[in-house]
Amino acid sequence: MSRVALAVLLPLVLGSSLSACGDSGSAGGTSNAGKTLRVAVIPKGTSHEFWKAVEKGARAADAALPDLEIVWKGPQGEGDAAAQIAIVESFLADGFDGICLAPLDARALETPVKTAIAQNVPVVIFDSGLASADLGIASYVATDNVQGGRIAAKFLAEQLQGKGNVVLMRYAVGSASTEQREAGFLEEIARHPGIQLISSDRHGGPDESKAIEVGENLAQTFGERIDGVFCSNESCTSGMLTALARDPRGLTSKIKVVGFDSSDRIVAALKEGRLAATVLQDPVAMGEKAVRAIHAQLTGKPVDARVQTGETLVTTQNVDDPAMRRLLFPLAD
């Protein structure tokens, strides 16, 4: 080959080699220039106000990140872990880049999460954790639920002046977030020897009608012996309030009820004095931080293994405080 031909070909060969090296770097997942990242955001349900507020935060993050596109999809109610598993599997089959998941069941959802991670699809868990801590998820974004339960118990003990009979209405077996709240409540209430726990094994579940039924049964069984009640989620809180309001003995005015989360009914009960307090999360922040965490993971940025979103007690005394409005009405504005 002549020197002239070699001089012409050499730059072309070097340029091709450098270009190939650059492509290899992008394929490693640390650069997504020009690519829209598709992320599935899968809540426990879509009907409760809490999840609608989480969606609001997730979409705010989506709007702020031009290289990201989220798809929000979950079971309609909160009682169908099989449906949630099928949703995760569907997104994996469709080749989504990442998943944000609020597991309905701490153990049942481990298998699809393991599958995702094995396929190099990063997973951010939000709201409620998984049973195992070593699955290799990118981040866990949630309230400190144990502390939320402690806050509820401490306030209820103060309201009862350290003595009386209390009832715990649980949510559902396998729901890590509410089980943590219940554990925190039991831990703190045990510090008050003058308070007796007379029932702690009834589950109201995700359907408010079931929670009403459980609440009515508790009222019939224990009646005027009950001095205080803690309910560990929105549907149970609302269901118990309805059950007490229906009782002809006027139990609503006699029993101190502390709940968890917010809704229009819960806010109304606070203002009317039928609910002594409720522990608030920040669902908008939770949704936004979960999406930002998966985006950071996908773009090679640092990701905190644990992101806390806060817990706040709102009572009949501070329900009208402007600082509480954002948490009480997360869907406003």
Image (cartoon, helix red, strand yellow):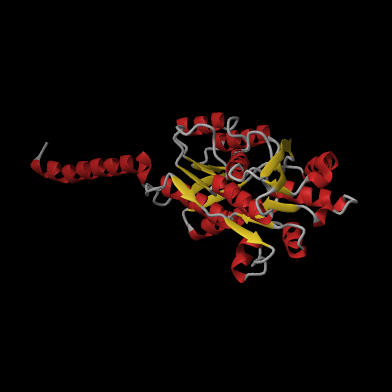
At a point 53% along the width and 51% down the height, the residue shown is 69
Q: Nearer the viewer, residue 135 or 310?
A: 310
Residue at x 52% of width, y 53% of height: 309
Question: Is residue 211 placed above or below 116 in the rendered structure?
Answer: below
7 or 26: nearer the viewer: 26
Q: Residue furthest right?
A: 248
Q: Is residue 134 left or right of residue 217?
A: left
Q: Quadrant of the C terminus?
A: bottom right
Residue situated in front as seen by the camera: 261 or 96: 261
Report x, y in % for residue 57: 57, 56
**Extreme left residue here?**
3
**Number of numbered discs overlaid on the protein picture:** 0
Q: Is residue 280 left or right of residue 48?
A: left
**What is the x, y in percent for residue 285?**
54, 56
Q: Is residue 23 visible?
A: yes
Residue closer to the observer: 231 or 25: 231
> Residue drawn at (76%, 51%), measured in percent from left and top?
238
Residue 85, located in which quarter of the rendered image? Answer: top right
Above or below 104: residue 262: below
The part of the image, by quadrant, that contains residue 28 is top left
Specify whether residue 170 is in view.
no
Residue 193 lies in what quarter of the image? top right
